[in-house]
Image (cartoon, rainbow, N blue to C red):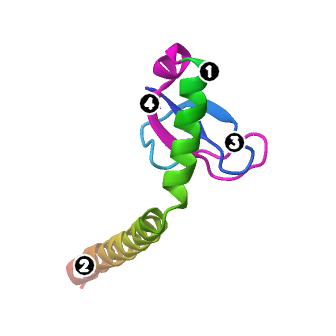
Amino acid sequence: MIETFVCPKCKDVFSKETKKPLDGPACPTCNLPMHYMGITADTWQNLTHDEKASLKEKMLEDYKSPQTIYLSRMSNDIHTIRNVVIFFLVVFLCSGILRSIFASLN
């Protein structure tokens, strides 16, 4: 699905096809991570100029709130923990496989 994103610095709106809309792509203009607007590109095209401006400002204000910053940091921490757990799971499984191979050779 083609989702709509807004850049916090240059305030440009871009659309991109994505499976994970909360992981915003980088802005083509200033290369900062963009914020998901919660609407599709088709919905964005059907809005009036005033509706677009108010939605854009509302989204930028929402992303400045302390709760959003806290949730973003917590999300990053959860992703890091998940990656560490997956790493140790892979190491554990590989060591078990190698032990069984060496045990069968002896």
Judged left or right of residue 99, residue 70 is: right
Q: Position of residue 74 (x, y in %)?
A: 40, 71
Element type at marker 2? helix
Residue assigned mark 4: 39
Residue assigned mark 2: 96
Q: Start and end of the magenta stretch?
A: 25-47
Q: Residue 67 carries which label?
A: none
Residue assigned mark 3: 11
Residue assigned mark 1: 49
Q: Which of marks 3 and 4 is nearer the N terminus?
A: 3
Q: Earlier in the sequence, mark 3 or mark 1?
A: 3
Q: In this view, does 37 lie above or below 48?
A: below
Q: In this view, does 94 lie above or below 58?
A: below
Residue count near mark 3 (Cα–Cα under 10 Å), binned few <14, some 14–19, many ≥20: some
Q: How far apart are marks 2 and 3 (CA)?
A: 52 Å
Residue count near mark 2 (Cα–Cα under 10 Å), binned few <14, some 14–19, many ≥20: few
